[in-house]
Amino acid sequence: MYYDDLPLWGFIGKVEDENWTINENGPKYYLFKHVQFDALYNGNQIIEIRAFSDPNHVVDITEDVDISVKFTYSIFWKETSTQFENRMDKYSRASLLPTHQQIRWFSFFNSVVIIVLLMGLLTMIFMRHLKNDLRKFSGGDEEEDKEVGWKYIHGDVFRYPPCMSLFCAVLGTGTQLLIQAAFLFVLALLGVLYPYNRGALCTSLVVTYTLTSVVAGYTASSFYNQFVETGWKRSVLLSGTLYLGPLFVMVSILNAVAVSYGATAALPFGTIVVILLIYTFVTIPLLGLGGVIGYRLRSEFQAPCATKRCPREIPPLAWYRKTPGQMFLGGLLPFSAIVLELHHLYASLWGYKIWTLPGILFIMFIILVLLTAMLSIGLTYVQLSVEDHEWWWRSLLRGGSTAIFMFGHCIYFYARSRMSGFMQFSFYFGYNACICYAVFLMLGTISFRTSLMFVRLIYRAVKSE
């Protein structure tokens, strides 16, 4: 339960099994009928609230029959000197216990080790293979040039991919979600957002998404117009619905489920109307404004090499060099670096514990971004070295594949938890699917941008023929 964004919990019943006899069928189950609340206040603000069940007021529910129970409660108000700004300190201290700290240090050390290993691998690639390739190509020896695979596709590597409108929409939406995540981290680190302040969190999500819509429109339009002069409006419209469309469908389904169960988790009709009005009269105009700005400020794509008219045929690839194999590797390593903290995050999201250290979450997010970027560089070089020039979509997919592993961990977490019933099942997987989809778009954008910088760098370093 929550009161004024404060969590409170207590026992709802008890089991008595000490006095078993031969004639009895098993333990007795009792339901508490009375709950006492102790509310601590300072001025006109609630500081803490506790719930206690009265063991003297119980009803026997051992028999599987319908019974009528009258519940009662009492509340006692107690004044305290604790300030409102410090009311979450008790939960923060729980997160700083030695056991929790040991787990977090192990998680951080695990992430650092993976980063160091990846940096060593990339250094080896640059110092040995890539440097030798550049030296051979710059030397002009045709016999040695034949040993260099990635230079032969310089006329195809900057060829824009199929489904360009969708590709630019992914970049626009991913960039928007990245900026939104940065804003939310800033608010959390400043203390504006704190645990279980769900109202402020939902408001921040709506406001930041609305304001950053101009970024999505600008990114999609400007990148699209670097290759194609017409059709940029379609890309902008796609960026406006690529994430919000599936999110709206999912929230509508979950809201219908909550209404059918009579649960308080259902969004009020007035809230739905307000959100739709904001999207219609604020989000869409800002999205269009960003698209127009991107079109007006368009520029040519900065490619070090000219693109040939006919694409080169890609040689047969081993299974581990194809998209599924690279997605598996590109998602597994970043996921393994954050899996421990991810477990704590899921436990906090679904009420099993309280997360009060946004700084730790921010550090893990930075580590995730760094790992995604470094893996993108290494796997892009591996792909180009076998003369596979279709790296655009693949870099995006392998970067976002970490979200697939995250959703797999969602399934594992649900199987290990005590959640049951269709409503909990639908809410858990529905909202987690939306979160993982957002992570997919963000990390996919990071992966492509990093790969694009790397490809431009290596082809700018060679001599043009």
Image (tube, helix red, strand yellow):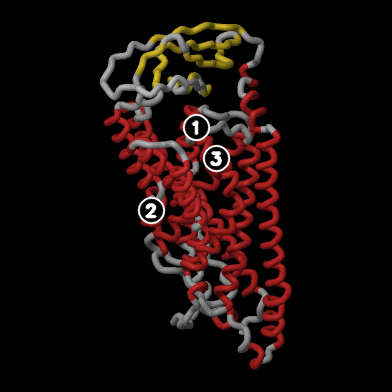
Quick one: quadrant of the C terminus?
bottom right
Q: Dots 3 and 1: beta carbons under 8 Å? A: no
Crowding at dot 2, Cα within 10 Å, few <14 / some 14-19 / many 20+, comes out as: many
Which element carries disc 3, helix, strand or loop? helix
Outermost residue to the bottom:
143
202 or 353, nearer to the observer: 353
Q: Which residue shows up at 61% across the image and 24% down it?
A: 88
User: Which residue position is annotated with label 2?
Assistant: 238
Q: Residue at x 49, y 29 (%)?
A: 198
- Residue at disc 1, secondary structure: loop
Q: Earlier in the sequence, mark 1 or mark 2?
A: 2
- Secondary structure found at label 2: helix
Horizontal and vertical percent position of residue 23: 35, 22
> Which of marks 3 and 2 precedes in the sequence?
2
- Give the image quarter of residue 374: bottom right
The three-letter code of the residue at mark 2 reads: Leu
Residue at 57% x, 40% y: name it.
344
Vertical order, 389 against 329 (above or below): below
Disc ID at residue 351 = 1
Q: Check contact, mark 1 vs mark 2: CB within 8 A.
A: no
Identified by mark 1, the residue type is Gly
Q: Is 375 situated left or right of 421 in this image? A: right
Residue 223 in the image: x percent, y percent? Answer: 49, 60
x and y percent of residue 452 in the render?
57, 65
Q: Image check: 7 left or right of 169?
A: right
Left or right: where 226 falls relative to 147: left
In depth, the one of 11 and 375 nearer the eye is 11
| First of labels 3, 1 by sequence position | 3
Residue 462: tell me if it is visible: yes
Q: CA distance from mark 2 to mark 3?
A: 31 Å
Q: Compare residues 214 and 130 and report the one nearer the observer.
A: 130
